[in-house]
Image (tube, rainbow, N blue to C red):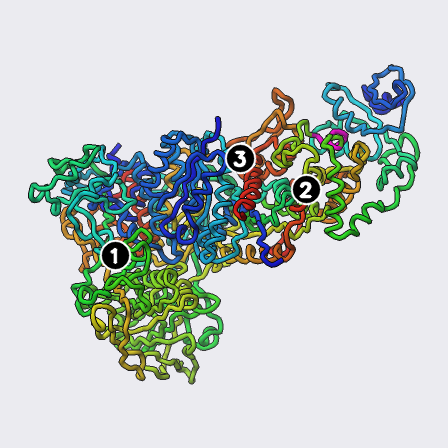
């Protein structure tokens, strides 16, 4: 691990280790005592990275990143939030158990430094089930789910691609001022915001104390975005289709624009 | 569905579709009374949040009307509209609000008759869909 | 720098537009209007063809822009008194006629009007209703100031009454007021004094002034207007009932070598418009337009005529009336005419209301105005514009003309001509091209 | 500052009041949040109406004004000015359109129209309550103009600009100037010498040091806004970028070619009126018997309009043939002779007096042209005589309409200006803004807008020049305060706005509160595209904030429930 400092010429290493019996992030400098390093990180290293970057100055950082971290970092980089010159990735391949828990379809980092790649999880049954439902059934299902929301903002604060400091959803403009639950629009607006950047890490769902199947929602919308615009979040080459012109695409005529 | 009069919100861009709506008025083209127009400068300024807010709070349909692609007063403003609004409709459909309640179309300043047609057709379509079920959703 | 003032004569739509463009272009404009308010004939119209835009709605903002513009001085109730010198150094005298009102004090509250005992036919309402000797010509008048008609006021003619002064709490009535002569230097003078309508009673064969239910198109325009004498209800003058059968007679005194040989240009279209409006006001009404050639040459005009035919059931008949007379008694009109073709036959038809579209003629003060300006009029009495390359130039350098003053023309053409005048005035001043 | 809103509902004569129950709407408005006054006027835009608003602002200490009347696209400046005159910032005014968008389109549904008017007013009031005072920016004006098209109207516009000392670029796609005028010898109805006119206009351009004539060229790109346009002119394999304060569209029209109609293109001796012009110009008309057919390809389904100039052209050329050959037998087959005005009517009379025969036909019985050897025969049903007649003829002249050139759609797209269904450019207002487009700083003249005579081309060109010279002489334009603004506290510098902006008017910079977006006011055109791209409302468009629009949605929901009761 410490090879990262030499090979990648990083000044710091962002990783996780055991602290007081729990997994905790740690930012190491060259020569620091590494302690008990952990690979079963229960949060997004990308998220931590974004928070520590302002304090690093000109230091280069190497970060232990799973595939989802890697994709989130790509989205951050596209938005100018990270300087790619200053971030190196130490690829961490998730094990079969982790992949299963996340119902992950894309578990293997572009370069693997730690662990071994396993197969992607089979198609998400929940997504298929939900998509098979009729409109009224879907509405019934999601109404019941959204009603459970405590508006704790766990989904947003644990999300690696929710960048805003102050969330729009904290204001009454778009969610009626009725306390909890926050109204039907809340998770839909979040869906729109995440449509061109969600990396399907599943943190929102894991963070949700009300067990709302947010990852399933994310996946369904990502699928639509891919179908409609061919865009996949985390692909470092592609700019969000929501921000670009239709250049090169067939001009949509007068018919069936929506 | 007899007697159901949907409430519809329409965002019209100042340069083409609002002008087209004005032209429909000048030409006294008769159409259903359900549509309430909000003027915005460009269809691209219509936040998906507005559409979601309206439809999740019981508005029966939302129309977003802009200049034809290529004719946008702001060059490529409506290119963004062309992506955002269909996606918004998809998101709504995912959770059970029929995407046909969101309509994006292009109406130029010269198309008073098209404005009339779009309004008439959309009202008819939404009437067919019945009241927005989100109206019944109580939180 | 040379003088940058321009005098505009006539406060109708052409004069208003010329004033606005000149003022925006940086000239100090003096707008001279002979009546108590600017607005001209367009202010009398209910709607305008071919869009049926409400006339006052589109005119009123322009009138107010004129009044508010820092570069425009409006002289209403005023006339051009004298012009000396040549472009770009005219010396112009303007006579501001006494309105017998202190315009700085008058609030147009209407207390005086309510008490004034003298009733006079209203010019603005085409004689369909009355006004008082102290009056505001119409509700949207600019400026909104009263005027005393000195020829009808009992105080000014007989030294009796004086009630308006007594009731005016603002102290605005001043019977001693005198005409004011204003002298100024001007680089250019713009004639935009528009048209008058031929007095239809000079052609008694058309029945105007003989049959009560024969009216002019301008009168119908007022009848159709919400702010008009009948609040927009279609009524015929004889008995106030709603007419069910209307006829329009085109080319009354125009395209007629005995009177005015030219075509007035706008009547086919305004008759079509009035027909559509009448149908909108009274959906059951039957309408026939009797015409010679249908002249629909402007943008959207032909489609407008088709709409009148197809959607409003307006009947167009190409013929001339042979005889117009009262129907039995007071109300209604009988008109005889021949249908066309060799198989044509003589028909006599009864109408509840017959509307004449009389020739639109050069403003009656054109001769005196032309004399003051040293400018030529054509045989019909319109200002001559001899230079094709500058359609708004008259025969006098620096005297420009726009709108109906140089010949029959509709509103958009008047407006674009008015803008052209602004370019010409700028050329005269900036480029020294007279 | 607590909102104190005044609501003014306009009758607009009976335009609104005959459909919408204005008094009822006033009563409803009185009960809306923050409304301290509600009233109605016969015409809100009259001086009386405006005085009432101004007085009410003072009397009721209003700090927001809502007028429910017609369209903001024509009347907003007027009411904004009235607010300003009464001492409140003009951006504290909100316009509700209950005429074009209500009374005029729901004429027969009075009750529902009244309900809708209430909803629209409630929405306007909700937005007004959240309006904020704004200050307008100013920007300079490039003292140059561009005229696209060097036909008669374009040349007249250019000459008028140059005569005022304004530097002018003239861009003509053909290799020479003049357009249709090149084919014309004399201009009716006064028989003015067309080539002399063309020569005098060309001379002004040739002699002016401020004229930049680009022949065989096109404008291929346009950026910017009134006062600061940037155009790319392409021609002769070269590309030039020029700056200008105003642009005039004078792309004209072309003669419709009636291929296959009345034997055109098949029978010798069947020509168009413009071809006759050319023959007359070269003195080559020897025909003794001439039949002219009017309205060929116009005033009929598919192309319904009257082309305005063809009747007069037929009359003029009939008289010219008679001047060459007084014994010529000329028949004009027409549907209506549209000789409006003094001189044209005079010409009609002259033609008639000199023996031109006028035959009227109807659309249902059109003339037929056939050839018998060298001779042409025109068969037509004369509506006046009510019988079919046969006319032998040496020459058949078809009067066809002026149509929009095929490439006018490119011009429209390039300039972002609308065209009607026939391809003619659509002016800002048919009646009172015939020379302007809704887009500031872009003007139109001549047959690009509608078929017009030479005389009309000239004055419209001059009118467009006058309009274009206004911002140039003023030297500045005011930027409406609808630009975007950034709350740098909220902004996380994700750059969505900068990417979405069609004008590259947004950049990410370091600020006191960290990195954030910054809007370049002069470059921002106020479209609001960035606003929709921002996820936390850190960028907002003045006058169209998400709080304001959100409030309108809430108001619509609330009002819908209220009026249903």
Q: Seen from this angle, which residue lies furthest left?
A: C158
Q: Which chain carries label 3?
A: D
Question: Is the Cβ of the residue at disc 3 closer than 8 Å to that at disc 1?
Answer: no
- CA–CA distance between discs 3 and 1? 46 Å
Q: Is residue C265 above or below residue D264?
A: above
Which range is magenta?
A155-163
Asked whether disc 3 touches disc 2, contact meaning CB atoms under 8 Å apart, the reply is no
Kindly identify which numbered label has been placed on residue C314: none
Horizontal and vertical percent for residue B126?
62, 54
Residue corresponding to mark 2: B138
Q: Does the magenta stretch include residue A161?
A: yes
Q: Can residue A50 be seen in this view?
A: yes
Per the image, the residue denoted by label 3 is D524
Q: Vertically, is B116 above or below D41?
A: below
Q: What secondary structure is found at the residue carrying circle 3?
A: loop
Is residue C296 shown in magenta?
Answer: no
């Amino acid at each position: 691990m410490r090879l990262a400092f030499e090979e990648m010429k990083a000044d710091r290493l962002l990783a996780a280790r055991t602290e007081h019996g729990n997994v905790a992030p740690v930012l190491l400098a060259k020569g620091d005592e590494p302690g008990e390093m952990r690979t079963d990180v229960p949060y997004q290293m990308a998220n931590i990275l974004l928070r520590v970057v302002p304090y690093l100055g000109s230091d280069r950082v190497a970060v232990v990143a799973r595939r989802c971290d890697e994709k989130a970092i790509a989205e951050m980089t596209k938005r100018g939030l990270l300087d790619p010159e200053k971030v190196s990735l130490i690829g961490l391949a998730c094990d079969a158990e982790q992949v299963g828990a996340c119902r992950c379809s894309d578990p293997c980092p572009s370069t693997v430094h730690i662990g071994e790649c396993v197969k992607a999880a089979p198609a998400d049954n929940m997504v298929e089930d939900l998509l098979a439902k009729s409109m009224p059934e879907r509405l019934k299902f999601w109404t019941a789910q959204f009603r459970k929301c405590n508006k704790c903002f766990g989904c947003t604060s644990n999300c690696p691609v929710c960048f805003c400091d102050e969330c729009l959803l904290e204001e009454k403009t778009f969610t009626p001022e009725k306390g909890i639950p926050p109204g039907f629009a809340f998770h839909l607006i979040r869906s729109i915001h995440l449509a061109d950047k969600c990396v399907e890490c599943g943190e929102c769902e894991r963070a949700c104390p009300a067990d709302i199947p947010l990852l399933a929602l994310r996946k369904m919308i990502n699928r639509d975005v891919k179908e409609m615009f061919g865009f996949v979040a985390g692909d470092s080459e592609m700019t969000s289709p929501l921000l670009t012109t239709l250049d090169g695409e067939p001009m949509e005529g007068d018919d069936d624009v929506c | 569905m007899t007697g159901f009069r949907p409430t519809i919100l329409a965002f019209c861009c100042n340069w083409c579709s609002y002008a087209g709506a004005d032209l429909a008025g000048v030409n006294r083209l008769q159409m259903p009374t359900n549509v309430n127009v909000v003027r915005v400068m460009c269809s691209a300024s219509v936040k998906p949040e507005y559409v979601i807010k309206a439809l999740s709070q019981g508005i029966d349909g939302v129309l977003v009307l802009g200049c034809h692609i290529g004719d946008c007063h702001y060059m490529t403003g409506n290119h963004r509209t062309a992506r955002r609004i269909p996606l918004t409709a998809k998101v709504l459909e995912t959770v059970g609000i029929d995407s046909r309640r969101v309509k994006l179309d292009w109406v130029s300043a010269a198309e008073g008759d098209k404005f009339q047609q779009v309004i008439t057709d959309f009202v008819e379509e939404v009437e067919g869909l019945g009241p927005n079920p989100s109206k019944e959703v109580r939180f | 720098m040379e003088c940058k003032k321009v005098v505009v004569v006539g406060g109708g739509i052409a004069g208003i537009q010329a004033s606005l463009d000149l003022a925006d272009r940086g000239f100090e404009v003096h707008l001279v209007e002979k009546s108590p308010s600017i607005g001209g004939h367009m202010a009398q119209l209910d709607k305008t063809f071919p869009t049926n835009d409400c006339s006052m709605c589109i005119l009123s903002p322009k009138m107010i822009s004129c009044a508010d513009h820092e570069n425009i001085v409006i002289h209403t109730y005023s006339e051009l008194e004298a012009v000396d010198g040549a472009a770009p150094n005219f010396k112009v005298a303007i006579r501001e006629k006494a309105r017998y009102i202190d315009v700085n004090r008058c609030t147009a509250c209407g207390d005086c009007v309510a008490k004034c005992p003298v009733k006079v036919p209203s010019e603005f309402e085409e004689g369909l209703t009355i006004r008082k000797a102290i009056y505001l010509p119409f509700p949207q008048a600019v400026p909104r100031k009263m005027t005393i008609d000195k020829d009808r006021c009992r105080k000014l003619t007989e030294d009796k009454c004086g009630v308006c002064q007594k009731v005016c709490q603002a102290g605005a009535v001043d019977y001693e007021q005198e005409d004011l002569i204003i002298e100024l230097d001007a680089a250019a003078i713009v004639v935009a004094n528009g048209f008058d309508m031929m007095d239809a009673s000079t052609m008694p064969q058309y029945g105007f002034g003989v049959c009560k239910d024969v009216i002019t198109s301008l009168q119908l325009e007022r009848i159709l207007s919400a702010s008009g004498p009948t609040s927009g209800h279609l009524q015929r003058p004889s008995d106030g009932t709603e007419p069910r059968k209307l006829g329009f007679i085109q080319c009354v005194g125009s395209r007629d070598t005995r009177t005015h040989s030219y075509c007035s240009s706008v009547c086919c279209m305004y008759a079509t418009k009035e027909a559509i409006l009448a149908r909108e006001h009274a959906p059951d009404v039957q309408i026939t337009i009797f015409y010679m050639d249908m002249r629909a040459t402007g943008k959207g005009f032909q489609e407008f005529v088709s709409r009148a035919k197809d959607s409003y059931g307006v009947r167009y008949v190409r013929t001339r009336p042979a005889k117009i007379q009262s129907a039995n008694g007071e109300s209604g009109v009988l008109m005889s005419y021949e249908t066309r073709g060799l198989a044509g036959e003589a028909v006599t038809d009864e109408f509840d209301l017959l509307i004449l579209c009389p020739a639109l003629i050069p403003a009656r003060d054109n001769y005196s105005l032309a004399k003051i300006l040293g400018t030529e009029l054509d045989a019909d009495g319109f200002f001559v514009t001899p230079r094709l390359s500058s359609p708004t130039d008259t025969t006098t350098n620096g005297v420009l003309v726009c709108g109906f003053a140089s010949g029959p023309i509709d509103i958009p053409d008047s407006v674009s001509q008015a803008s052209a005048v602004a370019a010409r005035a700028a050329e005269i001043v900036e480029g020294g091209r007279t | 500052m607590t909102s104190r809103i005044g609501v003014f509902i306009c009758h607009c004569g009976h335009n609104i009041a005959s459909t919408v129950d204005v008094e009822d709407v006033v009563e409803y408005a009185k009960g809306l949040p923050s409304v301290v006054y509600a009233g109605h006027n016969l015409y809100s835009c009259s001086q009386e109406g405006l005085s009432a608003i101004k007085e009410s602002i003072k009397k009721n200490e209003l700090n927001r004004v809502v007028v429910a009347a017609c369209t903001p696209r024509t009347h907003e400046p007027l009411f904004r000015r009235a607010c300003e005159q009464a001492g409140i910032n003009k951006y504290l005014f909100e316009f509700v359109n209950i005429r074009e968008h209500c009374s005029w389109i729901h004429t027969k549904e009075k009750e529902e129209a009244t309900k809708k008017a209430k909803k629209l007013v409630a929405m306007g009031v909700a937005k007004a309550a959240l309006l904020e005072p704004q200050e307008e920016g100013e920007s300079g004006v490039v003292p140059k103009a561009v005229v696209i098209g060097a036909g008669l109207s374009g040349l007249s516009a250019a000459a008028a600009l140059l005569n005022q000392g304004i530097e002018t670029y003239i861009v003509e796609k053909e290799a020479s100037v003049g357009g249709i005028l090149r084919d014309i010898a004399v201009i009716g109805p006064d028989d003015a010498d067309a080539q002399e006119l063309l020569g005098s206009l060309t001379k002004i351009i040739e002699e002016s040091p401020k004229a930049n004539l680009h022949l065989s060229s096109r404008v291929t790109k346009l950026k910017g806004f009134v006062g600061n346009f940037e155009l790319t002119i392409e021609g002769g394999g070269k590309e030039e970028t020029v700056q200008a304060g105003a642009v005039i569209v004078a792309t004209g029209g072309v003669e419709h070619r009636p291929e296959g109609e009345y034997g055109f293109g098949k029978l010798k001796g069947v020509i168009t009126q413009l071809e006759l012009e050319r023959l007359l110009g070269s003195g080559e008309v020897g025909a003794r018997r001439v039949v002219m057919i009017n309205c060929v390809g116009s005033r009929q389904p598919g192309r319904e309009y009257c082309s305005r100039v063809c009747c007069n052209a037929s009359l003029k050329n009939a008289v010219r043939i008679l001047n060459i050959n007084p014994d010529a037998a000329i028949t004009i087959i027409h549907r209506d002779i549209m000789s409006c005005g003094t001189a044209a009517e005079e010409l009609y009379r002259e033609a008639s007096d000199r023996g031109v025969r006028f035959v009227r036909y109807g659309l249902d019985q059109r003339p037929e042209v056939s050839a018998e050897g060298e001779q042409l025969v025109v068969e037509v049903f004369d509506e006046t005589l009510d019988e079919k007649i046969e006319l032998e003829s040496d020459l058949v002249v078809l009067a066809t309409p002026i149509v929009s050139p095929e490439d006018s759609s490119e011009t429209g797209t390039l300039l972002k200006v609308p065209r009607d269904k026939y391809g003619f450019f659509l002016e800002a207002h048919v009646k009172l803004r015939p020379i302007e487009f809704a887009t500031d700083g872009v003007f139109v003249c001549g047959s690009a807008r509608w078929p017009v005579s030479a005389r009309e081309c000239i004055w419209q060109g001059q009118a467009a020049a006058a309009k274009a010279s206004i911002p140039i002489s003023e030297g500045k334009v005011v930027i409406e305060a609808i630009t975007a603004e950034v709350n740098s506290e909220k902004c996380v510098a994700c750059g969505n706005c900068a990417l979405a902006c069609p004008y590259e008017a947004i950049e990410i910079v370091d600020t006191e509160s960290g990195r954030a977006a910054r809007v370049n006011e002069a470059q921002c055109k106020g479209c609001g595209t960035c606003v929709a791209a921002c996820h936390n409302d850190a960028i907002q468009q003045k006058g169209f904030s998400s709080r304001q629009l959100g409030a309108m949605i809430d108001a619509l929901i609330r009002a819908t429930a209220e009026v249903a009761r």
